[in-house]
Image (cartoon, rainbow, N blue to C red):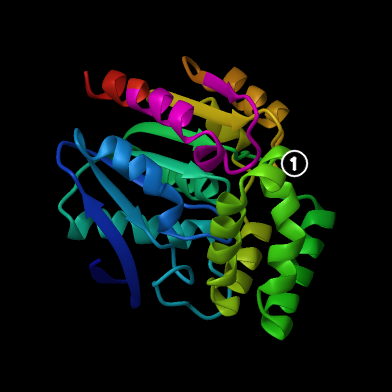
Amino acid sequence: MPFSNLNNIQIAYDDQGSGSAVVLIHGFPFNRSLWNEQIDALSESHRVITPDLRGFGESESSSGTATMTMMAEDIARLMDVLEIENATLGGLSMGGYVVLAFYKQFRARVRGLVLADTRPQADTEEAKEGRTQQAERALAEGMATIADAMLPKLLTPETVAKRPSVVKRIRDMMMSTKPEGAAAALLGMAAREDQTQLLSTIDVPTLIMVGRDDAITPVQDSQKMHERITGSRLVILENAGHVSNVERAETFNEELRSFLDLVVS
């Protein structure tokens, strides 16, 4: 597992496989291990890059607000270091916010987009206030309160009841997140731009995936993105919640492989 100094922050990442580059960006409050199943599925035919965003996993935290624009710039600098001119970028949840910010800034470096369990719109004032309170709570109390509150919204009730290893994996990821990193990202998400108008300008192949039972970014959000992004493909994953790439990894990977074949051809 290498590190790279990007914008005065040590960023940890994995770089596996060879072929066309795919950069997968994790959601909040996770780390690059969120993509383990996707790395296994793709690395035989693609070069798969999975960074820990600043403040998450083994990457260093930055002070203040970690904006989506800042995180997108980190990804661009990492691509420079790895001598990757362009790539397919995929993001889940907050990772999707970063992907859209990246597209807005670095369109020429994007071959395709994967938007999983995410949305383009900015937070409402109520949601912004909620994130600010969460950030304060993370710094004061650590990650346990946030993990316990989020967990039932991330997974389907069936997964919570019948797949304890998945529940433990997701909770362990959240608990390993640095409180200062979580707080900085929460403030960054609260401050993010509304990217709805950007969608109609997207002119690269785009795959949109969402869990049927996603309680955080509902199916309707993905349907609206699909309507605005010309030529996009929408896949609704049955019996999956917000971390659909983990709950329904096999189907997620099949769709992702088929999409990447299209992008590369």
The span picked out in magenta is 234-257
Total numbered labels placed on residues in the image: 1
Q: Is residue 35 magenta?
A: no
> Residue 238 sits in which quadrant?
top right
Q: Nearer the viewer, residue 40 or 178?
A: 40
Residue 254, how many percent across, how many down?
A: 39, 24
Relative placement, left or right, of 108 versus 45 is: right
Placement of 255 over or under 4, stated as above or below: above
- Residue at (44, 68) in percent of width and height: 57
Residue 28 in sight from this viewpoint: no
Q: Amino acid at mark 1?
A: Pro
- Residue at (67, 79) in percent of width and height: 142
Relative placement, left or right, of 59 versus 234 is: left
Give the residue pinned by disc 1.
157
Residue 167, how many percent across, how many down?
A: 62, 53
Residue 79, how many percent across, how many down?
A: 25, 53
Q: Is residue 252 magenta?
A: yes
